[in-house]
Amino acid sequence: MAKYNLYKILPEKRFELIEKLRAEGVEMAKKVEADGCVLEFLYSRDPDGSDIWWVKTYRDFLDGIESPKNISYCAAFFIYNDDFCYAVALGRTYMQIKNYCDPDFGINMACRIAADRVKIKNSKFFKSRRNRVTSSYQLGNRIEFDSGESLDFIRAATIDPTVWGTEANFGTAVQFSMNLAPDQLPLFCKKIEEVLAQPLRMELPKVVAVRDAMKLKYLDAKLVQTLGSEEHSKVVLVANENCQYSFYVQGAYGNLSEKCALDKKSLQNFFNLQNINLIEQINDIKVRVYDPEGHERSKSLKALIDFSDSEERTALIDGKWYRYNPSFVNSLRREADSIPAQKGASNDAKDIDDFVASFASSGFTDCRKAIARIDSKYRVNKLDLYKDGTLYFVKFGAIEAPNYAIDQAIHAAKYLQANHGQLDLEGQPLEVEKICLWLVDRDGAISGKISQIGSLNFLMKVADFKHSVLSAGFRPRIMIS
């Protein structure tokens, strides 16, 4: 039974990929045509040997013997025509091939031909308190996903073993194990093309880091262009209203600006004062953050920007560019909309202090000053309101940037979970059943479902909020005023 580690190559990149392989000493061996496709086999005729770790240790016992080397051959097999291009990686050629392939191919195939019971699942988590990378043995269980989970790899049975083999590995590539000769791969690849054109059988969320230097430069330029255009509202600065900020250029800390709010006007003033060419220097701009407890830290400007491009299916996550598939967004939208949400009373308060005070006079308990610190680890100093078993965390301002309120709600849930659900207010225990994120929507951004907000970071934070509150044994809620 043959194993084929099959990559889908971007057609316009095939010539460049072959040149890269030739530069690595991989040469053409044979080229034939079969079933309307061209088959090319390239392999390393004379590979360089690699050093062996134990040779240096035992050098004294190799008198008169030339130092041995490990010789490792590699190859690549291409199947292509005018419509598609696939490559089988044999040995270390995968290191070059993976840079020229469609990174969504493996998961796109899994969405169509994998059974919904898997053996192994490797995932990453975004905007989550969980480990960033996890591997799990599913033992044939039905595949399930948590909030913010991005699938990297699964090993699963296929829906039709006669066509795809009994099981396959789905990642960036797909590893098939089948009784199939290499010259039969053209018809197999045509079958793959047919399947990729069919609707999904199931949705599998995936996010991949953008690594191509030219693509990164293009995305940075698009961010800068949007920031300076009439669509600048799509670029949201993720600011904490309780913090102060200053700006500087990396390597020029002496040019630190005065402390100010993190807003577009302050940033533009800094750019003008320092004569910054933002297209060239976007990755050099740093932000110094001063929190209410007197701590300071520096972050890149891009790490404090919420921006996504639905056309490119790309987004900034923690200052780095990622490309996401529709299934990832759909899963986050379902998570957000699964949280019970209701409309709160209208209010004309100009800031959060007025907002909290107005509701404190109508049956809610104002907790902003009563609880400044719960213990040295959890500072729930933004527990804003309490009423009838519900803790309320108010987000006042840009609806896309609720990070601080959500973080405080999550900290409260963690504290309650560790403290067996006990929380005191002025010496009196509070009965807690629900934890509510209260969004003050001044711009009318939410007229229907929570998921209609176009911020990927917002949806990830809300999904993380839901997961943390449920894990702590409470019921998550969202209020919109």
Image (cartoon, rainbow, N blue to C red):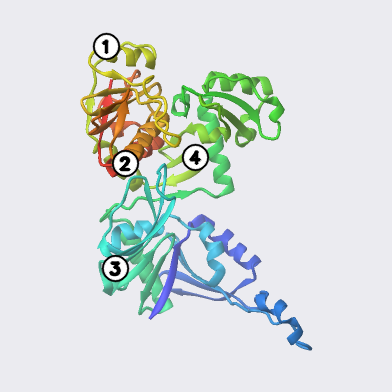
On the image, which quarter does residue 81 sit in? Answer: bottom left
Q: Estimate how packed mark 1 is, as few (under 14), some (14 to 19) or many (20 or more) residues with alpha carbons within 10 Å.
A: few
On the image, which quarter does residue 270 sit in? Answer: top right
> In the image, which is nearer the foreground, mark 4 or mark 2?
2
| Left or right of residue 67: residue 18 | left
Tag 3 near tag 2, CB within 8 Å: no
Would residue 469 be seen by someone viewing this image from the given angle? Answer: yes
Tag 3 near tag 1, CB within 8 Å: no
| Label placed on residue 318 | 4
Tell me the element at label 2: helix
The amino acid pointed to by label 1 is Ser
Tell me the element at label 4: loop
Quick one: 47 or 39, which is closer to the camera? 47
Residue occupying image coordinates x 54% and y 35%: 302
Q: Which residue is mark 2?
A: 417
| Label placed on residue 168 | none
> In the image, which is nearer the foreground, mark 4 or mark 1?
1
Quick one: 60 or 262, which is closer to the camera? 60
| Left or right of residue 192: residue 66 | right
Along the polypeptide, which appears first: circle 4 or circle 2? 4
Q: Which residue is mark 3?
A: 157
Tag 4 near tag 1, CB within 8 Å: no
Q: Which residue is mark 1?
A: 361
Q: CA distance from mark 3 to mark 2?
A: 39 Å
Q: CA distance from mark 4 to mark 1?
A: 39 Å
Is residue 261 shown above or below 378?
A: above
> In the image, which is nearer the foreground, mark 3 or mark 2?
2
